[in-house]
Amino acid sequence: VSPEFLTVGQPVPPIYGIEKATGALRFAADINLPNMLWMKILRSPHAHAKILDVDTAAARAMAGVVAVLTHRDVPRVLFGPYQNEIYPLDEEVRFVGDTVAAVAAEDWNIAEEAMRALQVKYAILPAIHDPEAGTKPGAPDAVLNYPESHELKPGDIRPDQLGTFGNVIGLKEGGPTVVNERGNVENGLAQSDVVIERFFRQSEVNAVSHEPRACVAVYRNSACTLWCSVQDPYRLQDSTARVLGLPMEAVRVVSTNLGGAFGVKVTGRFAVLCALLARQTGRPVKIWFTREEESLDSHNRSALTHYVKAGANKDGSLTAIKVRTFLDNGYWPYGGLGQNIAFAISTRPIDLYHRCPNVKWEVFAVRTNRPSTGPYRGRADAESHFPIESMMDELACAIQMDPIEFRLKNRLREGDDLCSAPNKIMSTVWLEEAARAGAVKIGWQRRLPLAAATQGARKNGIGMAMVIHSCGSNPAGVSEAEVTIDSTGRISLFSGTADQGSEQQTTLRQMVAEVLGVSLTDVGGANADTSTCPFDSGPFSSRTVYATGIAASRAAEEVKKKLLQQASALLREPATNLDIGEKSIWKRSDLSKRVGVDELVRIGGGSISGRGIHNAKEDRLFAYGFAAAFAEVEVDVETGEVKIVRLVSSHDVGRAINPMIVEGQILGGAAQGLGYALSEGFYFDPRTGTALNQWFLDLRTPSILDLPDIEPVMVELGEPTHPFGAKGCSEISYVGVAPAVANAIYNATGARVTELPMTPDVILKALRDAQRIEA
Amino acid sequence: LISFKHVDAASTQHALSLLAQYGEGARVLAGGQDLLFRIKKYIVKPECVVNIKTIPGLNYIRLQADKKLRTGALTTLSQIAQSVELQRNYTVLAQAAGVVASPQIRNMGTIAGNICQDVWCWYLQDGFSCWKSGGKFCDLAGGDSRYYGSIMGGHLCLSNHPSDTAVALAALDAQVHVASPRGNHTKAISDFLAGHTWVDGRLQSHSLRSDEIVTEIEVPFRPTRSAYIKFALRKSWDFAIASVAVSAVIRGGIWTDVRIVLGGVATFPYRSKEAEELLRNRPISEPAAAEAAEVALQLAKPLKMNSYKVELSKTLVRRGLLSLGN
């Protein structure tokens, strides 16, 4: 609790918290309009094929079927979050589950039956099911059709530069997608006291949002409105306008309440098809994904393999990191998702260990015939920290140094330059403070030497991992906000950002309330409706509280400034002598000299408004989040079961605008991270590319009984580039859990687990391997 | 969802006549926890669903004077799990019923439905060959068998029998009462669940004919101690990777009459009579339990990705036996 603030720092319940908890909150799937049609998508049974023909006659002949769309019926227009998805429907299908055709019918059952009545002739094409195999010379192309024309942004890879380089997304023949290099890694390794080499493998995982995607589209008078579970409404607006050939202002997208978006509910094919069907039928059209569709037609955290070599000297200095990573990009054409993830994988851990002089990290983002990769919670850092933090633990052990001290000696510091954000300088780094606070909380001094327990089947151990994640500053982020006071005195915040489940609207309104000296309940407004809200590039990189927060605070400051100016004229006092609060302005030294905000608004012509913007490109100082995860485990060496005894998640949050919400985010992220560590995997048949476990049960997110009481720690030492000192923290708690658990298992048993998820079969194999090496 | 007729059966006789009338096209609905998923996924396409939940008098737990247990087919898993008498006298059954899936499923799911459920297999879907959906080989055999593949071989289908309660019932020598147009009869659970077999044109994991229903499960009383250990990835809403049901009559530190049944590893509840015999009249000891565990798994021939279940099951057998105490 911050004594200098009224609302900021208070753990007030989220504005829709009760509604969410009681089930009263409405989502896109709850929207039903009169005369509405239901849409279903026919999905490809083949990993890679060309559609020769779709016979729609039987489906069209069914009573209640109103429209059928095939690739012949849709505009050949690029769309998607990066405007690089090839046509709403294409003749090439690129993964099992890819969209083949869409039908609209009077009810869901008829739509389903009609979808099943479509007769499709395919020419089956060779497919790529394994990223490493996809890089081999002579490997078939996973994707044949590329966008023909594209408005390139600086830094984008041109599609015509890709074709000759097989399936690797990149600029050079045979080269990786990205390489981050400094010093001389081979010399560094050669001169190290200790070198460790490991191979890591991580399974693909799905975000398993509780809410399957839904969209309702209405087309009327050459204008289209979409209510959609989408976290980037402006990009969907742009895509819909392109596909329908309408001006942007004729398309309205309302991002509905999201039942967990986790970064992956971005502009998708289903929504633009829904809009096309609404136009064609002249009736409202609704689509609601099944759980299987939600798993398949999404963006997953990729399957990865990492070949890692790292060295250290006995004095605790990290000497060299060499990594080659293969990332399953899925079918996604180029740019945007896989490419950005590849870049962040190769750079952010290297920023974390900024003192390491010799680095070479290559990432091969390889197109395969799988669902697309994408920005799932902790994007890129969950992918990279498992190998790196496992290596740091083992190196520290090898040079007999405390793993915390080893990491801190080599870490990033304030003022360092960043390879993950060229030309930017690191702002605050409260990593050491977070690590030490977490160590105290879990009782790090209790940690025993490696595999100290000799008796019994159940071995206890403690491990930790340090984490960096972009928590606010993202070079691609722009946020605008508007604050208004209308003639009735109502204060409103308008922000384009969608609330993807992390209650940012509450937090943003808290900041506005603080600036204007009112209580949270005095601030209303709207968000994520493209017709009423100013632009926001969307909630990703945990940027909302930071970037949109800056914009909203600036907007509120402008309103405050206008109010003070008018009060100053009215009260004949310099503005510096005035205070604002409780909907009035008064002279600090004479409380009787006072004027109400409502009166100022009336004098000011009926309303007062202010706008704020934050554009990360203009920032020199970048704000990142830092965290330390600590796990205490009990490993049953006879069954491979890993019980989480304690999990401490300690964070540099800058300042918690709303500690209740921050704590909720830390707990949720850590719970998901625990699934990544121990039970979740999204598996595909290696011969056909068909998903094996797309059902809710088989995706195996942890149940409440599998979770320990996660213990959050918030280190609040501020961030000077934010008006209230906040950094984002909704993703970062995911990232450190898997390596912390792996390191705790190592501490307990001496077995190094290098595969995710760490299921019993994986644990038992690691234990056997460790025994073999010992013998 | 496909269209089908839904009829509430007024009596067992009524149910049997409906089943006879619709033949192949009929399916029995009790709790619906297994059937509805299969209908929604087009795995099962019934012409008529016969709802037996409306038959009065099939939901009961009765302990007779001789403590023999009789439980009606429609008794829910929650009722069984929460019965104090079962917890005391048929511990393994109450424990197994209490760890099936999730609380919601246990509230709806019935004991008869639980033992009659079909396999949960990643290859029982479009795009794969599966005997149960008309295929001519089993894609699980060479596929991803880490959770649901048998380690004990099998006939045609290699997917595990997924039930928890069936494993417990096998350790209690349960009898299944069947109402049939050819005369009501009882079957030992080991005959009722003997692996995947063709019955009336369906490859089933139980031996019930398409015109029969289960009405009761009967368990003879023995003065045993018993326990069920389920090993799964999650503590709620999950199938067993491996499980064990053990029951034993113990007198003066000696195992006199033991049952050892494995779940999650075979196409039926896998009882090892060899391991049971090995322990007959032997003093309770850890080495003896380990020996029995070795014998119980001696016929294991795991698939490509599930060999870890062999050692895991041995551990469960040993721990299960020792958990019964002296």
Image: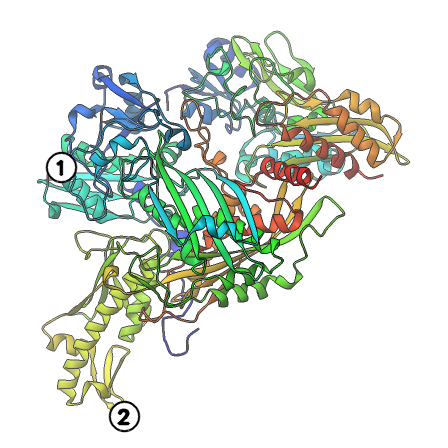
Q: Residues within 10 Å of mark 1 (few under 14, many from 20)?
A: many
View extreme (bottom): residue: A590
Chain containing mark 1: A
Chain containing mark 2: A
- Vertical side of B186 occupied by B162: above or below: below
The picture quadrant where one finds residue B186 is: top right
State the separation of the CA atoms marked 2 and 1: 61 Å
Regarding mark 2 in the picture, which secondary structure is present there?
Answer: loop
- Vertical side of A316 occupied by B93: above or below: above
How many circles with numbers are drawn on the protein? 2
Residue A674: mark in rendering: none
The residue closer to the viewer here, A395 or A247, is A395
Residue wearing tag 2 = A589
- Horizontally, residue A773 falls left or right of residue B113, namely right
Which residue is painted at 41% across and 69% down in the image?
A10
Q: Nearer the viewer, mark 2 or mark 1?
A: 1
- Horizontally, residue B139 falls left or right of residue A331, namely right
> Which percent across, then down, holds residue A573?
17, 90
Q: Are marks 2 and 1 on the same chain?
A: yes
> Which percent across, then down, holds residue A462?
62, 55
First in sequence, mark 2 or 1: give its number.
1
> Which percent across, then down, holds residue A154?
20, 49
Please indicate, yes or no, whether residue A222 appears anywhere in the rendered image.
Answer: yes
Identified by mark 1, the residue type is Leu
- Vertical side of A243 occupied by A347: above or below: below
Quadrant showing the C terminus of chain B: top right
Which residue is painted at 32% across and 49% down in the image?
A257
Quadrant showing the N terminus of chain B: top left
The picture quadrant where one finds residue A217 is: top left
Identified by mark 2, the residue type is Ser
> Which percent across, then down, holds residue A474?
30, 56
Residue A244: mark in rendering: 1
